[in-house]
Image: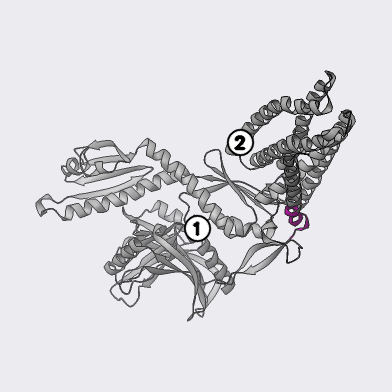
Amino acid sequence: MPRIWLYKVLLVLFLVLGSVLYLVPSLAKTTEKVPVKDPVTGVDKITIVEHDNLPSWYPAFLRRYVNLGLDLQGGLLLVYHVDVEAAVYGRVDRWATDIEGILKEESSKLPDAEKFTAVVSSSEGQAKIVFTPPAAMDKYAGEKGLLDKYGSMRLLSKDPVTGTVVWTLRDDRIEEIRKYAVDQALETISTRVNKLGVKEPSISVAGGSNIVIQMPGLSEKDFDSAKKLIDQVANLEFKMVDDENKFIVDLVKAGKLPPNIKAEPERVGERKVKATVYLTAPTKDDLILFFKANPPPPGYEIGYEEEAVKGAAGETTVETKWRTYLLKSRVELTGEYLTDARVEIDQRENKPYVSISFDAKGATIFEELTAANVDNRMAILLDGKVNSAPVIKTKIAGGRAQITMGGYKGYNALLDEANQLVIVLQAGALPAPIYKDFETAVGPQLGSEAVRVGLTSLVIGAALVILFMGFYYRGAGLIANLALLLNLLFLSAIMALLGATLTLPGIEGIVLTLGMAVDANVIINERIREELRVGKSPRAAIDAGYNNALRAIIDSNLTTAIAGVVLLQFGSGPIKGFAVTLLVGLATSLFTATTVTRLVFDWLAARGRVQKLSI
C-alpha cells in the first residue's frame, strides 16, 4: 500500500480517538443547582455546577460539553421590546440641557447691554428655545449661529417676533440612535444575564427592536430574580432639591390637598432659615394624580421616594409610604460617568450600601456641583425614583458617592438589593426603556419529553438509512454505514469541542445531515456501478467512480452550505441551532464520504484482494 494511504488511516484513527475523548465528558456529565456565596457581598447567586464524574487526571482541554437548549432542559423564555423612540427623545433632552448651559455661559461673557436669556425646553423629540430679546435669536440660533455647530440637529422653525426656534434631530441621526439603543440594550442585557451564572443563555435581536432571551436550566424559584434584574433600566441621575421654593407650601395653604395626602413639615439639617413642606401618601399613584392636576412650575419636577412608616414610639415598621421632593429638572450628573460600583457595609448602622466612583470628568463635575451647593440637598435618582437626598455639607473631591438601600427592609433583603444594583450599574444602564411582550416558563418535563422524542427520531432515522444502504448496496452499503456512524461521532465531538448548544431543531438538523450524508455515498456507488458495467476492473472502477462523483458531491454540499450560512447569519434561536448542526454535519459527511470510504475501498482493491465488488 502507498505510504499516503497509511497516513490517511492514522489520521482517521486519531480523529476517532479524539472524538471519543471529547464526547466522554458530555456523556458522563451531571448538573446540580447549588447556592454559591459571592465573596464580596455574601449573597447567594444562581449557580449551576457541573459534575463530569471523570478522574482527576482527565486532561482539562478535553473537558468540553454539548449543552442542552431551552427546549430540551427547560428554563425561561422572555421577549422584550426596546422603546427606541424614548432613546431619541432622551438624546434631544440631553442636547437641550447642554445647549442651555452653553448659551448661559455665552451670555455671561457679554456686556450688560448685549446680555440675553435663552429658555430651553424639550418635548417628544423637539427642543424649543425662546430668546429674550428676540434679536439674539439670529446671532445664536440662525443657520450660521452657535447652534449650527451641532451637526446632528436640524432647524424646524423660527419666529423672529417672539424669538422662538424649534430644533430636532436629523433623520439619519434618529436611525443611528434607534439602532444604537437596540444594540446597547442587547449588550447590557447579555452582561446582566451572564452575571446570573446561567449556562449558555441565548440572547438575540428579532424584528428590529425586539430582544429574545432564553435562559435554559433556570429553575422557577429563580425566575423573579432574573426578570427583576433584566427589567431594571438603571438610569442613575443627580438632581438638586429646591427647599426655597414655596410651590408645595402654597398648595397646602390653598387647601387643595385631598384626604389621602398629608403635608408634613421638614427641617433640612440644622438650618433654621430653611424649612419646607413635603407631601406623603400611601401610594405613589395618589401623588402622581394630584400633581398631574397641580403641575409644578416650569423647570421643576416632583421626585418620589418610598420610605418606612414610623410607629408610635418612632420605630421603623414594615409598612411604607411615598413622599415628595421638589426637584430642579436639570440633570446635573448621570451614571454614564461611572467607573465602579461595589457593595460595602456601613459599620455604624450595620447596613449595606452601594459605593460608586466616577471617572475624571464625572469627578470634576461632582466636585464642582457639591462646591456650589453646600447646605443644599442633592437627590440621587435611580430609574426616576429618588433613592436618597442627602445634604451637601462640604465640597466632595475624589469622585465618590454612595447609594443607600431602603431602611425598612431586613439586612438580607438590603444586601440582595444592593447586590442586584451593583450588577446593573456595572453592566451599564439601558439606553431606553424595555417592555416585556412575552414570557413563558418551559418546565423540565416538557424538556425531557422533547429529548426523548428527538433522540427517538434520530435513532429511527439512522436505523432506516443504515438498513436501506445495507440492503441496496450490500458490501458497499456496509462501508457507507461505517462512514455514517463515524460522521455522527465526528459531528457530536465537534459540537462538544465548540461548546455548542443542542436544541430540538438541532437534533432535526442532525437527522437531516445523516440522510444527506449517504447521498454522497449513493452518488459514488452509482458511479462505481456504471464503471463496472462497462467492464472495468474493481481498482479502475473505484478510481473512476470517485473521480466522477467528486464534483457533483462538492456542488450539492456547497449549495446546501450557502443556505446554512444564510440561516446562521440572519436566523435566531432555533434557526441558528439548526444551521450550526447542518454546517458541521456537511463538513463531517464530506470527509467521511470521500475519505473514509475511499480508504476501505482502496484496501479491498489493493493487490487484487477482491475480484468482484459487492455493490
Residue 565 badge: 2
Q: Decide: is 350 above or below 24.
A: below
Q: Decide: is 411 above or below 613.
A: below
The crowding category of the residue bearing disc 1, from other C-alpha atoms within 10 Å (few below 14, some 14 to 19, many at least 20), is some
Residue 130 lies in quadrant: top left
Percent x, y for residue 256?
Answer: 39, 58
Q: Earlier in the sequence, mark 2 or mark 1?
A: 1
Q: Decide: is 110 above or below 205.
A: below
Q: Residue at x 81, y 43 (%)?
A: 453
* Helix, strand or loop under label 1: helix
Mark 2 or mark 1, whichever is nearer to me: 2
User: In this picture, which residue range is highlighted in magenta?
Assistant: 21-30
Asked if residue 28 is among those painted magenta in the image, a careful observer would answer yes
Q: Nearer the viewer, residue 406 or 583?
A: 583
Q: Which residue is mark 1?
A: 427
The N terminus is located in which quarter? top right
Left or right, 485 with respect to 79, comes to right
Q: Is residue 253 visible?
A: no
Q: Residue at x 26, y 45 (%)?
A: 129
Percent x, y for residue 184?
Answer: 48, 49
The crowding category of the residue bearing disc 2, from other C-alpha atoms within 10 Å (few below 14, some 14 to 19, many at least 20), is some
Amino acid type of the residue tagged 1 in the rendering: Ala
Asked if residue 479 is among those painted magenta in the image, a careful observer would answer no
